[in-house]
Amino acid sequence: MSGVFQSAAMAPLEDRGGAAQPLLIARDLVRHFKVKGVGLGEEAAVRAVDGVSFSLFKGETLGVVGESGCGKSTLARLVMHLIQLGSGELIFDGEGVGAPDGVSVDDLRRQVQMVFQDSASSLNPRMPIRDSVAFGPYVHGKSKEESRRIAREMLGRVGLNPDLFGPRYPHELSGGQKQRVNIARALAISPRMVILDEAVSALDKSVEAQVLNLLRELRRSFNLTYLFISHDLNVVQYISDRVLVMYLGQVVELGPVDDIFSRPLHPYTRALLGSRSSMDPANRIEEPPITGDPPSPIDPPSGCRFRTRCPHAEAVCELTMPRLGQWLNRDSHVAACHMHEPGSGHTLAVGNA
Amino acid sequence: MTQAVATSIDTSWEADPAPAAKTRTYWQSVLIRIFRDKATLIFGTVVLAIVLLAIFAPLIAPFDPYKESIIGRLKPFGWRGHPLGTDELGRDMLSRLIYGARSSLLMGMVPVLVATLVGGTLGVIGGFAGKRVNTAIMRTMDVFYAFPSVLLAVAISGAMGGGMMNGMIALSMVFTPALCRIAETATAQVRSLDFIEAARATGARPLTIIRHHVLGNVLGPVFIYASSLVSVSILLASGLSFLGLGVKPPEPDWGLMLSTLRQSLYVNPIICAMPGAAIFVTSICFNLVSDGIRSAMDVRQ
């Protein structure tokens, strides 16, 4: 590569808050979905996301794990403002999203992009893929030619020859290639943050590895911050710097990836890690550490939501909801569990003599 | 600035910025596919011929379509130079068929076009907006649905009075709800797909999304249904004419001719069948051509 390589890409918006300012702070995000048909005239709410708080530091990858239906995808769509926030606030690079003196939703969407799980339905079947990639820059005021140039470059950056693949339609591509196109499309308007919602979950293992490596490489070269949502613990362990564990719409544990995987605090995290299949025949799983389906998010258990499946559940768990400890920086490792809250009343609580 | 960072990915094509092959636009490739499809080409030629006949009727028709003859009624093919014989009033059948193409094509196509524009627009708006807007539009359409289409057409043109213009308005109103529903269903289907979410996430406005991502996926089903309505429209129009609400005698119109010749069915059945044959050929050609265009528009080929 020569040094005179001229990039056609849009310039990413500048860093405003400085390196120490988290790129995204989520405070008490809540989103309930109304459901009908519980009873005549009754209305209930699915508590999809129920008071989620976290910060996303610049340049890191925050992995979000949890069972199906725990609110991971809802969280992604809330951050992207694809669905309305019930309550809570989002602060992007120090400025409130949608606040009068903050950053508008449009500006947010210029800086945050998303890659969806279903690579097939996330591309317009009647559009050549280069037009799908060029659509973003076009919407943001680039001319058709410029948008095409950006699309060419982005396709190249994700490892697809633009001359060969550009004029093709999505159905002519494999799943891995389609997901590369989706990544190119997300990067085409030079965002600072990318939400990857189960982005590699539908791919087979060898392609998954390629795409994961591509994502790592792109993160470095475009200076990106990832919110990486997955149910696959191995993938999250591989790509994340920090991990957020969700259960029934709430954060149960948050911490650096190595801490979470080597010494998980929350019983749910332990159960999740215990459920991974082992490659070591001597270390085979004898019985499932966690059984049954999670309780209904329409009517979650009182107190700690995990208590119905928790081996350490006590009276206090039914009475009060454990709070997630205060996190200060990237190295904080906190869990929402009475056992890790001194003086909570749990017999196994830390600090109890 | 962080772009322009070398990656391990092969970027050798950067040296050649001129993409030579395969830079056809979507519509170019559609045209190419149509030209490869023999059947569509042939039936398209027939449709074109009918349209040309209608436009240049005065130049092509061998006789005056209104000139009656008391002795030359219901004569067979070739009688005294009348290639397709004469009708029940002794008028030249071929000339009347050629002139009749005018009103039949107009009555067949204009209402469908108007209904496609109005119904399609309402359907796409309803399907994309969802919720209350959709309910308002679709329930209004359902009111029209409640009546049988012939009855509705008769009622509307009856209320507004006869004539071709009112007939076309009535037929447009008959077809609008059906096309609206087709467009609404197709739009609602597309709207739930991730690429619409992705486009929204890019910051695109609803109109931009509709123009770039929705219309292309909705046009196909709407188009195929609309083209199948052309023949229905010709038939309904002839029904209106028969009741004295559409084209008025002695104007040549296929539907009207069919109904007036009805009484002579036992005298000269071949002559009586001619307008029906014209309607049949025209509508089947329209259907086959639209089918060909639809499959040419489908990129999965």
Image (cartoon, coloured by chain):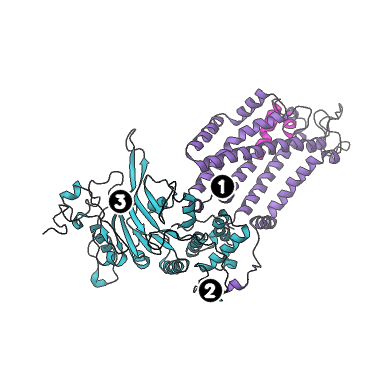
Type of the residue with mark 1: Ile
Residue ranking furthest to the left:
A353
Q: CA distance from mark 1 to mark 2?
A: 36 Å
State the extent of the magenta-drawn residues as a range: B230-259
- Give the residue displayed 61% in from the left and 45% down from the top: B224
Q: Is residue B242 magenta?
A: yes
**Which secondary structure, mark 3?**
loop
Residue B125 position within the rendered picture, expressed as x and y whole percent measured from the top left: 55, 41
Residue B135 position within the rendered picture, expressed as x and y whole percent measured from the top left: 49, 35
Residue A75 in the image: above or below residue B135? below
> Which quarter of the figure has residue A93?
bottom left
**Residue B210, numbered circle:** 1
Q: Colour of chain B?
A: purple
Q: CA distance from mark 1 to mark 3?
A: 36 Å
Q: CA distance from mark 2 to mark 3?
A: 44 Å
* Earlier residue among tags 1 and 2: 2
Quarter the N terminus of chain A occupies: bottom right
Quarter the C terminus of chain A occupies: bottom left
Type of the residue with mark 2: Asp
Q: Which residue is mark 3?
A: A248
**Which secondary structure, mark 2?**
loop
Residue B154 in the image: above or below residue A221? above
Q: Residues within 10 Å of mark 2 (few under 14, many from 20)?
A: some
Type of the residue with mark 3: Leu
Question: Mark 3 belongs to which subunit?
Answer: A
Residue ranking furthest to the right:
B80
**Residue B10, numbered circle:** 2
Tell me, by letter, which chain the rendering colours cyan: A
Q: Residues within 10 Å of mark 3 (few under 14, many from 20)?
A: many
Frontmost residue, A337 versus A302: A337
Frontmost residue, A14 versus B123: A14
Question: Mark 1 belongs to which subunit?
Answer: B
